[in-house]
Amino acid sequence: MPTKIATRKSAIHGNGVFATTAIAKGERLIEYKGQRRTHDAVDAGDSGDIESGHTFLFTLNEDWVIDANIAGNAARWINHSCVPNCEAVLVEDADAPVKSRVFIEAVRAIQPGEELTYDYGITLAERHTPRLKKIWACRCGAKTCTGTMLKPKR
């Protein structure tokens, strides 16, 4: 994948990833990388703290998570948005689910200098209290912003 992106400070939150050249709709931009860990290992450590409002975890399936805190790349800096210009695409490996991969792809044309975003789709087992919604606040600035990165429970 050619480098069409760069990491720098974001107006949304902390660091962000930005287009350095025009990006076409459907273009695959970067793989979300990090160490493969079980949910139990993540829950037992400090990477899965729901109180932080900050995560570098990407769920692959019911058994495995990509933890970009360990051996992660620039994809971990892509911020959440309620109106994203990218999406995360899971490429499953049915024979070895731990080897499944996640790629970030453009869902529309992206102009140079524009920040890349996708919808994190965060679901928590815990009740979505006002306190948790504040911890997981969305700062995307979209007119239709929900105010939280948390998705309603189904």
Image (cartoon, rainbow, N blue to C red):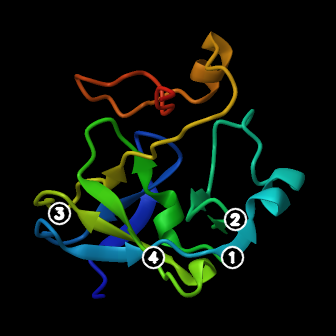
Circles 1 and 2: CB distance less than 8 Å?
yes
Q: Position of residue 131 (x, y in %)?
A: 67, 15
Kind of residue sitting beneath label 2: Asn
Q: Is residue 144 above or below residue 83?
A: above
Front tag of 1 and 2: 1
Kind of residue sitting beneath label 1: Gln
Circles 4 and 2: CB distance less than 8 Å?
no
In the image, is 140 to the left or to the right of 95? left
In the image, is 63 to the left or to the right of 21? right
Front tag of 3 and 2: 2
Tell me the element at label 3: loop
> What's the mark number on residue 35?
1
* Distance (Cα) linking label 4 and label 1: 16 Å
> What's the mark number on residue 69?
2
Q: Residues within 10 Å of mark 3 (few under 14, many from 20)?
A: few
Q: Read off the residue under disc 4.
A: 92
Asked whether 9 or 75 is in front, the reply is 75
Q: Read off the residue under disc 3.
A: 112
Quadrant (top left/top right/bottom left/bottom right) for the N terminus: bottom left
Tell me the element at label 2: loop
Circles 4 and 3: CB distance less than 8 Å?
no
Q: Is residue 125 above or below residue 80?
A: above
Tell me the element at label 4: loop
